Amino acid sequence: MWSALVLSFAVVFVAELGDKSQLMAMTFALRYRWWVVLSGILFATTAVHLVSVAVGHYLGVAIPATAISIVGGIAFLIFGAWTLRGDSLDDDEQSKAGRVARSAFLAVTSAFFLAELGDKTMLATITLATDNNWAGVWIGSTVGMVAADALAIVIGAVFGRHLPDNAIRYGASALFFGFGAWMLGDGLFPATGVVGPIAGAVAMLLSVAAMVVVRRRARRVTEDEAPALMRP
């Protein structure tokens, strides 16, 4: 149980870094008391992740371990791409965060419950529950999400809306790519026991290198275009 708890905490905490839920938590923290926002997040997360581990647990009973690793690896690669793309609050979600409600707790709880349905953290929890202790996954994923959102609440309350999230997003994406490659390696080559960790480390390093190269090229393009825009 403890290994599932620690793994789930780490995965979900990373998934929440730079996620839309953190943006919502920061925005709510500008309107309501921090303990009300955190209580609403805890209530919503507990409910959503209980459903997630139930789905994942009963799916895992019928699916072979190698298939779980392969499907889970593909899922985590998708999570990496999803995280790399980033999230932003649309007009409807922004209005939810800014609307003064009669009950701040119900406003936060309902908003987070709806936001987490089908989100990558819910899918990650389902994936983890297919091959790990369901109670450990439930507790770990819930605590991981609440901890990440608590960090956003502190930042939102102290520093306001300005948060440089590119480095956080890139790091989280690299970790997801590493997790995905690790699980794929274990699923495709289960007898070796070393292909997964090696593939995960290589994927993470390549992801970081690729992001650095893309970032530098984008910066060069911006610097080259700036003089041209200043010409008459």
Image: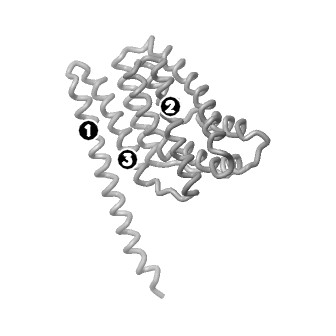
The three-letter amino acid code for the residue at tag 2 is Val
The tag on residue 52 is none
Q: Label 2: few (<14), some or many (≥20) within 10 Å? A: many
- The spot of residue 152 in percent (x, y) is 53, 47
Q: Label 3: few (<14), some or many (≥20) within 10 Å? A: many
What SS does tag 1 mark? helix
- Residue 44 in the image: above or below residue 51: below
User: Could you tell me which residue is drawn at 64 percent across and 52 percent down?
Assistant: 30
- The spot of residue 117 in percent (x, y) is 60, 32
What SS does tag 2 mark? helix
Q: Label 1: few (<14), some or many (≥20) within 10 Å? A: some
Q: Quadrant of the N terminus?
A: top left
Q: Which residue is mark 1?
A: 201
Judged by depth in the image, the label closer to the viewer, 2 or 3, is: 2
- Residue 155 in the image: above or below residue 115: below
**Residue with the most extreme top position:** 62
Q: Which residue is mark 2?
A: 143
User: Could you tell me which residue is drawn at 68 percent across and 50 percent down?
Assistant: 31
Judged by depth in the image, the label closer to the viewer, 1 or 2, is: 2
Q: Which residue is mark 3?
A: 171
What SS does tag 3 mark? helix
The three-letter amino acid code for the residue at tag 3 is Gly
User: Could you tell me which residue is drawn at 41 percent across and 41 percent down?
Assistant: 80
